[in-house]
Image (cartoon, grey):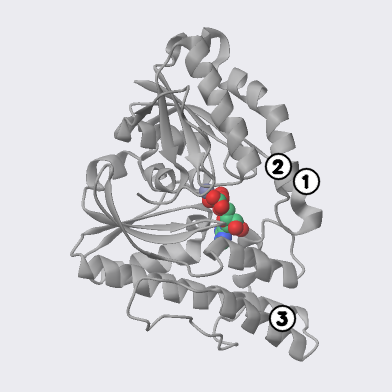
Amino acid sequence: MNILGIETTCDETGIAIVKDGVEVVKNVVVSSSSFHKKFGGIVPEIAAREQVKVIIPAIKEVIGSSKSEQVDAIAVASGPGLIGSLLIGVETAKTLALVWNKPLIAVNHLVAHIYANWLSRKTTITSLVFPFIALVVSGAHTDLLFFKNHEDYKWLGGSVDDATGEAFDKVARVLGLTYPGGPQVEKLAKLGDPMKFNFPKPMINSGDFDFSFSGLKTAVINQLNKIKMNDRDLKNIAASFQKSIVDVLVFKTVVSAKNFNVKSIAIGGGVAANLELRNNLAEAANKFGIKVYSPKANFSVDNGAMVASAAFFSKKYVDPRTISADPGLYFS
Ligand code: KG4
Ligand code: ZN
């Protein structure tokens, strides 16, 4: 079954065709991130205007000359996300479903981030089995979930303030780096000493599965304001900040996996591309015989393929006449 996946929840326009939920036939991602650089974060209106321009050419590029014949269903991320951006993807998907007479499947963007693990990863397809713990770390969300089966999951906890990616982006800004800051903070951190600054590890001992990264961000800003920093200090700050975040994420994720007695952890979302997180989590989980799965780096960030994959496994068909974009969609 070939599903055309459409992803426009934030600043990317992701269009892909995925066969049977796992095999990526074609994948195109157009990002407007360069337009947001000078503002230090995403400007929703700019994101939506760019998406209006690029969505039809991106769909044309993905479907190629065989047009709609190869598409068996259309999938769209209907939330959560920016309302202007979401509307573009959802209205396009509805229109195509009606005009091409194809079934339409609506997908939760955050759940789709976890399904990125199954994309073109042969070992994951056979060995990532239910139940597992899922950690979603994106620009706008941080969530821990217990996945019993497809469409059967329990939300364990999440961020009470800044999301993981948001904290990376805000710290990047005060370090003088451009948006999106996460990959740049990671690059800078590689050159620094993570033990140099003793930043807080918020809520690490809170005994629940919630997260808070706003205070950590403030601690970094306070440190920067204290004395004039040289290049070495900035590298050490990036490394120490990243260590605090990674330590909290790793600790709570491994504790949840032990509590729920699972043998696998799957991570997803833009911050899942962070190698320090991937490696430290794998190392900590391996001590308890728990295996960690992460998507290929290009499928960690927003893309249409993960939407098509989640749709294949959920088969949650919706009526194109009644479905609407839902910016506040969460876990149900
Ligand atoms: O999942 P995503 O593409 O978009 C949302 O759904 O929000 O995540 C984007 C976020 C940005 O905050 C970006 O800075 C962060 O993921 N990110 C990273 C890395 N790559 C992307 N954060 C830390 N380290 C990275 N390597
Ligand atoms: Zn995302």
10 Å crowding of disc 3: few (<14), some (14-19), many (20+): few
Q: Is residue 331 above or below residue 156?
A: above
Q: Secondary structure at mark 1?
A: helix
Q: Which mark is residue 35?
A: 1
Kind of residue at badge 1: Phe
Q: CA distance from mark 3 to mark 2?
A: 35 Å
Q: CA distance from mark 2 to mark 1?
A: 8 Å
Q: Which mark is residue 232?
A: 3
Q: Which residue is mark 2?
A: 47
10 Å crowding of disc 2: few (<14), some (14-19), many (20+): many
* Residues marked 2 and 1 touching at CB (< 8 Å): yes
Q: Secondary structure at mark 3?
A: helix
Q: Is residue 326 above or below residue 157?
A: above
Q: Is residue 166 above or below residue 131?
A: below
* Residues marked 3 and 2 touching at CB (< 8 Å): no
In this rendering, the label closer to the viewer, 3 or 1: 1
